[in-house]
Image (tube, grey):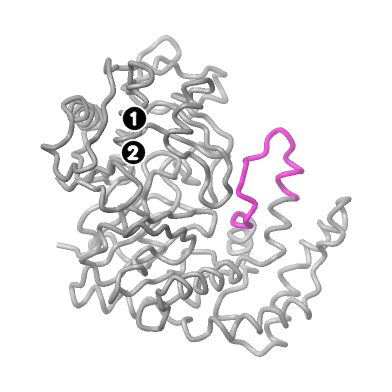
Amino acid sequence: MGNVTVIVGCHWGDEGKGRAAFFESQDAHMIVRSTGGNNAGHTIVYKGKKYALHLIPSGIIHKGKMNVIAPGVVVDPDVLIKEMETLEKDGIKVTKRNFAVSGRAHLIMPYHRDLDRLKEELKGNSKVGTTGKGIGPAYSDKADRIGIRLYDLLLPQKKLQEKIELAIKTHNQLFKANEGFENCVVDSKELAKELKQKAHKLKRFICNTDDLIQNAIRKDEKIVIEGAQAYRLDIDHGDYPMVTSSSPNTSGAISGAGIGPKYVNKTIGVTKAYCSRVGNGPFITEQDNEIGDLIRELGGEYGTTTKRPRRCGWLDCVVLRMAKITMGIDELCLNHLDTIGKIGNELGKIYICYAYKYNGEVIEYFPDDIEITGEIPKPLYISLDTGWDIPKDCKTYEDLPAKAKEFIGLVEEISEIPIKYIGFGADNKYTIVL
């Protein structure tokens, strides 16, 4: 039996993975962030205090836990330094005893953010709708073997400058060729100097995280991998090209951490009681109307990182069922049970998508040839005829209103995944474990 628990998103991100990872990590030795960058924000509310984390795993809030940023992550040093400083102000000390970052993790450089903005502009109407944080360009440089890693911060300044000069050859040509981006041309000497200054704040945390993780595996200590993004944003299995630049599925998460699949004990999928999406791409159950506006306002659906309003719609169990196999999901964490109840109170109806009608047929999978057929699948729904209010003193499943239990039962039946955690409020204390 393995000792690794993986937390993954089931739809398009923003499902509340940070909450699930935080709760699951209470009895863990180590919490690992293994993919993505600071385009993924995890909001934790603990003992009435809100923590907005973007790189450091949420387990940092627990005392006595080791928190690791693994090689599969792309790290913006400015964001990481600011995050550490913010935690210190909140009374959470970040030390070598509770935090480490892989020297093999690649850096998001200032020019990656400029490239992100430029490439989105060049795509015109086909833009993806990225967060503009430089994630894609950083992963592109990694694949092109010209990326700058955290280990490079420990090199002599001249050697670091040489690596930057190699990386920016084509980037500078692109900046010079596009009006309005001429001032983005990189001065390698100046940038190397700036990075060496930042290195002083990070160098004590930079190490070989494989050694830390493998020792925990050998000792059979519980490890929680805190996933980023979600199933339909996966670069291989998502809505390409409207996807992220990494593999946020379970296999990608453990690969980014440097852990083999035999050590995974269970995978927890996280979903909300409705769906949301940031950026462009297909969203079959989207409610681009007053219903979507209501879901957004009641659920507070604005990006942790960007503050952008999210597109909102009904829960899509077709995607949930597909995620079960692709992600190897054993259990579900269902968040925003209180929100969907309020929506039902307002509208008198709640809907769950169980299948699609596509090309004249009823299908139970997400079609990947929408661009070819030019047809958008029509969602088929099952409905509940009322909402509910969850009492503030609710602590167990038995305390939930009957209609809320009916909703939970339908989600389990349609998705074919048992629900383990139920979230019904911002603070982590509003969590029911089944």
Q: Where 81 sits versus 286, above or below?
A: below
Disc 2 is placed on an element classified as: loop
> From what the image shows, is residue 212 above or below residue 261?
below
* Residue 330 locus on image (x, y percent): 21, 46
Task: Sort mark 2 into few (<14), some (14-19) or many (20+) by Cα contacts within 10 Å.
Answer: many
Total numbered labels? 2
Position of residue 322 in the picture relative to residue 112 (left or right): left
Q: Amino acid at mark 2?
A: His
- What residue did someone put label 1 on? 340
Q: Quadrant of the N terminus?
A: bottom left
Q: Nearer the viewer, residue 231 or 200?
A: 200
Name the element at disc 1: helix
Instruction: Please tell me which residue is depicted at 50% across the width and 46% down the height of the picture.
Output: 235
Name of the residue lying farthest toward the bottom: 156
What residue type is disc 1 on? Answer: Ile
* Most foreground residue, 73 or 57: 57
Q: Position of residue 70 (x, y in %)?
A: 43, 69
> Pointers 1 and 2 in contact (CB under 8 A)?
yes
The x and y percentages for residue 214 are 29, 76
Q: Residue at x 33, y 79 (%)?
A: 212
Residue assigned mark 2: 336
Part of the protein shown in magenta: 118-136
Q: Is residue 126 magenta?
A: yes
Farthest residue, direction front: 392
Q: Nearer the viewer, residue 411 or 385?
A: 385
- Figure check: 30 above or below 278: below
Q: Is residue 79 magenta?
A: no
